[in-house]
Amino acid sequence: MELGPLEILYSWQSVLLAIMITTLTHGVKALIDVKFGGTAARRRSKVMGKLVLPAIPLVLGAVLGMLIPLRPDVLMAYVAQHHVNPWAIGACYGVAVGQFADYIYQRFMNKKTQHDAAEGVPVAEQKGEN
């Protein structure tokens, strides 16, 4: 069975891994908020906003992709056929799924913010700040 990149990305393994990455990313962001003084402090930091936070889903994806044997069969068939390091393929697969999960999450949050703005929800409630 020949699957293309989109079929691999939309497989149940990828969706499950994306959910795990998104959940863990929010856990890490909550830990960062607790450690560094809240959401407002995190948003003011340029290093956090431009370097650390965008890298979290990618790093988590690479780690989970290497450690959890949850990969599509066609990807593992490629590894067996071409004698590629399965750890490297797992890491690259995890990074791709992490990037995809972050992309989908950002689009969802933008639509939610637009919907909340149209409904008249105050900005502080949209961002989760009280």
Image (cartoon, rainbow, N blue to C red):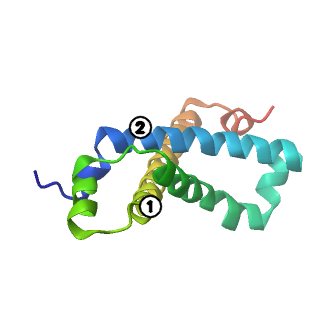
Q: Which residue is mark 2?
A: 16
Q: Quadrant of residue 127?
A: top right
Q: Residue at x 31, y 38 (%)?
A: 12
* 111 on left or right of 82: right
* 97 on left or right of 130: left
Label 1 is placed on what type of residue? Trp
Label 1 or label 2, whichever comes before in sequence order = 2
Location of residue 71 in the rendering, given as x and y in whole percent from the top left corner? 34, 47
Q: Quadrant of residue 80?
A: bottom left
Q: Which residue is mark 1?
A: 87
- Judged from this view, the residue extending furthest toward the right is 37
Label 1 to label 2: alpha-carbon separation: 19 Å
Pick the front one: 27 or 72: 72
Q: Which mark is residue 27?
A: none
- Which quarter shows the C terminus? top right
Q: Looking at the image, can residue 102 be seen?
A: no
Q: Residues within 10 Å of mark 2 (few under 14, many from 20)?
A: few
Q: Residue at x 48, y 38 (%)?
A: 19
Q: Secondary structure at mark 2?
A: helix
Q: Residue at x 35, y 41 (%)?
A: 13
Pick the front one: 69 or 57: 69
Location of residue 30 in the rendering, given as x and y in whole percent from the top left corner? 74, 40
Question: Against 118, is 82 above or below?
Answer: below
* 50 on left or right of 36: left
Q: Looking at the image, can residue 88 be seen?
A: yes
Location of residue 123 in the rendering, given as x and y in whole percent from the top left corner? 70, 39
Label 2 is placed on what type of residue? Leu
